[in-house]
Amino acid sequence: MTARTLCAAVVASIALLGCADGPPDKASASMTGIQASRCVSGACIMYVTVGGNPLTVKVSEPTLQVPANNANAVILWQLRTDGYEFRQGSIRFKGDNAAIANRNMIHPSHSTKVYNLIDTHMDFGEFKYEITVYDATTGTPIPLDPSIVNN
């Protein structure tokens, strides 16, 4: 991938963040039986917060469903809690199909408050991932394990 391609993907993602109208629509993931939210437009924003005692990470869409007709959807995680940040690798796919997920989810980029990638939707399935938010002062990691479902 060239630097020009990567820069274009980042700029497009940031532009879509400004245009997106909020979290994905709620729907039932009938294929998997999982209650999920559907990513039905070009950009899907998930809000991430940190709180509680002990500290936990919450994402507005613990299971995000991306239908086949939304290939190349930009998926954005927006961190809404001050004092915490994303870092390189804050989104990591895991489990038996992590290699397939990494082939589908491309061009990851981030700032301390926004992490994004593009879902090419080349493969169907549920892709489990770990999202890790870090305490900006101490660097303490706080993980959560949601998923993305391509159907």
Image (cartoon, grey):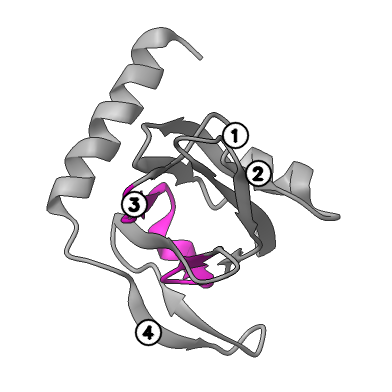
Quarter of the image with the C terminus is: bottom right
Q: Is mark 2 in CB contact (under 8 Å) with mark 1?
A: yes
Residue lying at 29% horizontally and 63% vertically, measured from the top left = 41
Q: CA distance from mark 4 to mark 1?
A: 28 Å
Q: Earlier in the sequence, mark 3 or mark 2?
A: 3
Q: Which image quadrant is residue 4 in? A: top left
Q: CA distance from mark 4 to mark 3?
A: 18 Å
Residue 3: x and y, percent? 41, 9
> Quick check: 41 left or right of 38?
left
The one nearer the camera, 10 or 84, is 84
**Which residue corresponds to mark 4?**
26
Q: CA distance from mark 3 to mark 2?
A: 16 Å
Give the magenta range. 57-82
Amino acid type at mark 4: Lys
State the residue lying farthest toward the right: 96
Residue lying at 32% horizontally and 28% vertically, measured from the top left = 10
State the residue lying farthest toward the left: 19
**Which residue corresponds to mark 3?**
78
**Which residue corresponds to mark 2?**
92
Q: Is residue 43 above or below residue 110?
A: below
**Nearer mark to the viewer, of 2 and 4:** 2
Residue 27: x and y, percent? 42, 87
